[in-house]
Amino acid sequence: MANNNTALGAAKTGKKDEFYTQLSDIEKELVHYREYFRDKVIFCNCDDPYESNFFKYFALNFNALGLKKLIATCYDGSPIAQQELPLFEDENNEPKKKAYKVEISEVPDLDGNGSTDLVDVQLLLRSSEHNVKAELRGNGDFRSLECIELLKQADVVVTNPPFSLFREYIALLMKYNKQFIVIGNTNSLTYREIFPLIMGNKLRTGYTNFNVGMFFFIPDSYEQFHHYQGGRKVARVASSCWLTTLPVSKHNEEIICIKHYNEEEYPKYDNYDAIEVGNVNDIPCDYSGIMGVPLTYINKHNPEQFEILGATQRFCHDLVPDTRKYNDYWEVKQSGERTGSSGNKTNENANLLKNDGIHNYFTNKEGRQIQSAYQRVFIRNKKPQIS
Ligand SMILES: C[S@@+](CC[C@H](N)C(=O)[O-])C[C@H]1O[C@@H](n2cnc3c(N)ncnc32)[C@H](O)[C@@H]1O
């Protein structure tokens, strides 16, 4: 059985996008947003209704959540599309992997069993003029004009989009000014399309614990997986996280800072005018300067308490070249002098405490040695307790 902690990397590089979210994970996260769904149009735009648990969640809870409308579109590139939920029996011998849209505007308890279930939805699609199942003209790509027309109708977009198109996906939702709740991964947090949104308090992590890993169903053809569940391959993605534009109450809570700054415990970097804080719990309460904290800080960020100023480059920035472009926080020598010639800093020496040649090296394509021990986010306390 293969270890799948690297599955996400494979998803990114090999365009393996078929990671199907489990209903339990969806329920755990979405229970917190009920008030934002009432009377709203929900759009799941990377979701084959036959197999998507996002669609299933909203269809089953349509009345309980008070939805105005649920729309889902299916991409015809999905290799295991239309095999799961028996919502659309293949009465017309329609070929598989067609791109569909489903629009649901009412879900009465048609089977009379007192609750709303998938049988009701199936009946509705056959009988109600308010509910539509129709083939799309194109391939169901979320970027296609017909899917964008549906996007325009939506109030909240909720899905797990393809990892390989994550940047484009988020950029599109932002362009159309949509609220969204999506599954992403911690690697994407420092993308130039994502990090400025977090810095600007337009995007934040969701409720589910950050970086603990989620398990996804994957197609049989994927080699790396963690275990079988009900005969299907399941992969663990250690770095998955939820990202949303909607309010998340934990980001209103202040991080409790009990430690006090001292030079020994919080040394300055060689190449940033900032102190190293290796653990979010150790952020000193009384430091007014700039601090480098681990990426996990983003999961606790309260914009009233701290300001995010930037981030270091990635460990291996040859592979992630764009991370150097958004960073407004200049790399400086400890004299305060800038090391770069523009705001797009870098001299390829990231946040090592000691640039002494002993610490971790990464050798880039040109054979040059690059030091960059940890990814760090730069923050400043908005109200340091200075006595
Ligand atoms: C990570 S999977 C998640 C599927 C589903 N949303 C879920 O959570 O179970 C992403 C899905 O997006 C589909 N997809 C890939 N490229 C797409 C595109 N350009 N437009 C729409 N969907 C796409 C993939 O086929 C895949 O089914």
Image (cartoon, helix red, strand yellow):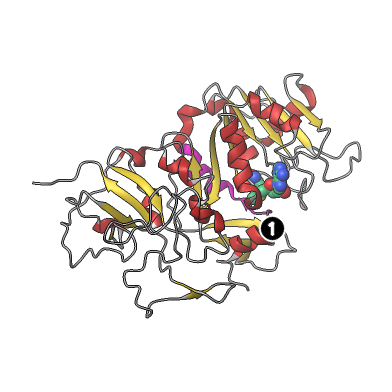
* Residue 364 relative to residue 99: left or right: left
* Residue 202 relative to residue 160: left or right: left
The amino acid pointed to by label 1 is Lys
SS under mark 1: loop
Tag 1: Cα neighbours inside 10 Å, few (<14), some, or many (≥20)? some
What is the quadrant of residue 265 in the picture? bottom left
Q: Position of residue 260 (x, y in %)?
A: 15, 56
Residue at coordinates 66% horizontally, 61% vertically from top-left?
13
Q: Reply above or below: 211 against 203.
A: below
Q: Position of residue 205 (x, y in %)?
A: 44, 45
Q: Which residues are magenta?
A: 16-31
The residue that mark 1 highlights is: 16
Q: Reply above or below: 307 against 70.
A: below
Q: Position of residue 155 (x, y in %)?
A: 57, 26
Residue at coordinates 65% horizontally, 68% vertically from top-left?
224
Looking at the image, which residue sits at the far left?
387
